[in-house]
Image (cartoon, rainbow, N blue to C red):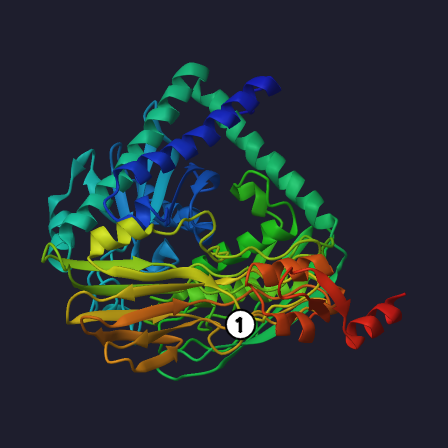
Amino acid sequence: MAEKQVDVITLDIIKDSLLAAGEEIFTAIARTSKSPIIYECLDFASGLTDDKGNLITQGNGCAGFLGMLSSMVKEVIRKWADTGRLKEGDIIIINDPYGGGGSHIQDVGVVMPIFVEGEIFCYVADKCHWSEMGGKDPGYSLNATEIYQEGLQMPCVKLFNEGVLNEDIADIIRANVRYPDLSIGDMWAGVSGLRTGEKRILELCAKYGKDTVRAAINRLLQSSAEYSRKQVEKIPDGVYRAEDVMDKDVHGNGPFHVQVAVTVKGDRMTVDFTGTDKQTAGPINLALAGLHSAIRSVFLACTDPEQNVNDGVFEPLEIIAEEGSLFNAIRPAPVSCYYESMQVALDLVWQAMAPVVKKGQLTAGHFLTVGAYTMNGIHAVTGQPFVNCGPTLGGWGAGCDRDGDSCQFCTGDGETFNIPVEILESKFGIKITEYALHTDNTGAGEFRGGYGLILGHEALNDDMDFGGAYGRHERPAWGFAGGHPGSTNGFDFIRLDGTYDGPYGSGNRIPMKKGDIVRMVTGTGGGYGNPLARDPARVAMDVKNEYITLEDAREIYGVEVDPATFAVVGATQARKDFQAAQA
């Protein structure tokens, strides 16, 4: 049947309504969840796909989920819809990283078909980080050696049958997690998002007719693909390569060689990770669907990051990775810290393309790590057990015309937020001893890298545990065009007796006693351009703001600053020589 012809204005109104529905789904989840990592951090994503599983719109907290909704829906179609077993009111739950999930077990997805006039019209899906999914450690295991240690796996099973909750699945969840109220609460938040999306789609189809809405969806996907191909065509044809070394895993395996070849030919881009090291026993492995999400993010950065996100946008993109490698792991490799390999894969493409795309489009390297940590114990006031999971802020790389952003989440976290001090202390019964910029003399450049974070948690009870996974602990963020590298990430302990322990890049269930302080310390982003070219007034302001010292100003930037007035009073010989060479 020929596609219905509809005027462009109507199609655009429907398109905007679809985008609004995606945002409303997102808001519904944030306002109904029980875990701070969801309602404060916004560590989740939600959206709509067409009846084939192609993403239409996505309300996004985590940029790292940019592709995982599609992979979940396509697994639901393969297992349930194609076999005729998907009914109106069914909801599928899925967190299997190797079966459409793409990330780790704690990211739980739910998918619901939306029926219009007796047939599947589209799907609504969301994926949220639950605070607890069982496994050998609270929160999640940072030293697992196989996926079976990481928690309860739900391989695309029915949570609802024709609108009725499958109580057996809910009972299995309750029996396998340490904090069932949190996990079941987060489950219902996901369901609320699905029902919000269903309501809006049914309203649209009732108002305009399903054929008109479908025509708008098809136009959205087609026009996005056409626009995206034009953006790729602006990049010069060629093969652009980068290679790097990834930190050792928690078991001491590695370091790992990683590499990429990005081929741009006409309106197509192929990203090939062939040659990257094999998967490892530590939980830094990445499933293929997760790799696709990572590369989608940097693809947007290389083309147009402001366009509306749907699967049409990524039609010109092909991704290749050898099966069994770090970036395309196979079961039963552990994946709790998948995000570290995900970030490295993204950063490789970033390094390869930074010299190629339009100047200013990509910055120098950023601190890269999610900086995920987990802390558990007994609440000092309520006496109830708790688990505190969250990401950590850090420094971004400088651009060709601006300093790097300070204390932002990494590319994988995207539009997420930190958990406020008041929430951390009240929910988890700990004391925040420090929440400050991590300033040092790294990341220098004509434009300097953004600063990292120091976040201190003091245990107010004995027998607390802390675990963290911080990539770029051994190798800092890279500078660009003469800019200096940034600094590294990690965590350390200041014990009650005054002894210092650390720094560490990773560790699992490290004991803490009452009065012990753990500090998460993240790095500075890379600098852009030679530090001797930095505006002296900017250098003086950094000294005044206590970002750098007088000695740093002189030795790194070649600027003499008056310690009393913070006025620029001269230049070193190195700076004069540099300026003469540039004249």
Place residue 52 in its image quadrant: top left
Residue 109 is at least partly visible in this image: no
Q: Amino acid at mark 1?
A: Ser
Q: Residue at x 33, y 81 (%)?
A: 500
Q: Position of residue 173 (x, y in %)?
A: 16, 53
Between 127 and 510, the one nearer to me in the picture: 510
Q: Please state the horizontal and vertical placement of residue 220, each as a whole percent of the image.
A: 56, 32
Residue in front for this viewpoint, 251 or 212 = 251
Determine whether, in the image, residue 165 is placed left or right of residue 554.
Answer: left
Position of residue 163 in the picture relative to residue 29 (left or right): left
In this view, the residue in front, 55 or 395, is 395
Q: Give the residue at the far right of this rendering.
A: 583
Q: Position of residue 481 (x, y in %)?
A: 72, 67
Residue position for label 1: 487
Q: Is 164 situated above or below 7?
A: below
Residue reaching furthest top? 207
Q: Residue at x 31, y 47 (%)?
A: 38
Mark 1, Cα crowd under 10 Å, few <14 / some 14-19 / many 20+, is many
